[in-house]
Amino acid sequence: MMANGMIYLMLKLEEIEKLAKLARLEIPAEEKETLRKEVGEILEYLGQIQKLSPKEPPKEAGLVRNVFRDDREPHPSGEFTEALLANAPDKEDGYIKVKKIL
């Protein structure tokens, strides 16, 4: 069947009934013909998409890995403590004081 310049793949009613049975669907008789045409149109559209699909496999990214710097010459413990605490709104005994959550 041809419509709007497209050739629709025509399924048999028996194939629609088999699909309905496999999907455990009850399709009224008056809807089977409409469904047959719609499924045919969908299959035709998928065929067109397959024709447009590239023949070569998709490109893959190179080796993916995490890059870490060597931890050489770390800062001495407490070197920035005073500077950080100076910016805290509330502090107590060298710690930042926050509201109790629980």
Image (spheres, rainbow, N blue to C red):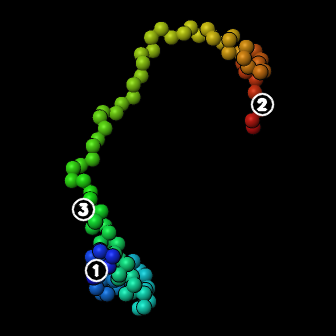
Provide the residue designation for mark 3: 51
Rounded to the nearest whole Å, what is the CA distance between mark 2 and mark 1? 73 Å
- Of tags 1 and 3, the one toward the viewer is 1
Location of residue 75 in the rendering, given as x and y in whole percent from the top left corner: 54, 9
Residue 99's label in the rendered image is 2
The answer, for residue 39, to whether it is visible in the render is yes
Location of residue 58 in the rendering, given as x and y in whole percent from the top left corner: 27, 47
Badge 2 element = loop
Three-letter code, disc 2: Lys
What residue is shown at x 42% (from left), y 18% (from top)?
Answer: 69
Name the residue furthest left: 55
Bin the neighbour count of mark 3 within 10 Å (Cα to Cα): few under 14, some 14-19, many 20 and up.
few
What residue is shown at x 75% (from left), y 15% (from top)?
Answer: 93
- Of tags 2 and 1, the one toward the viewer is 1
Provide the residue designation for mark 1: 2
- Of tags 3 and 2, the one toward the viewer is 3
Quarter of the C terminus within the rendering? top right
Bin the neighbour count of mark 2 within 10 Å (Cα to Cα): few under 14, some 14-19, many 20 and up.
few
| Earlier residue among tags 1 and 3 | 1
Name the residue furthest front: 5
Location of residue 25 in the rendering, given as x and y in whole percent from the top left corner: 43, 81
What residue is shown at x 35% (from left), y 81% (from top)?
Answer: 37
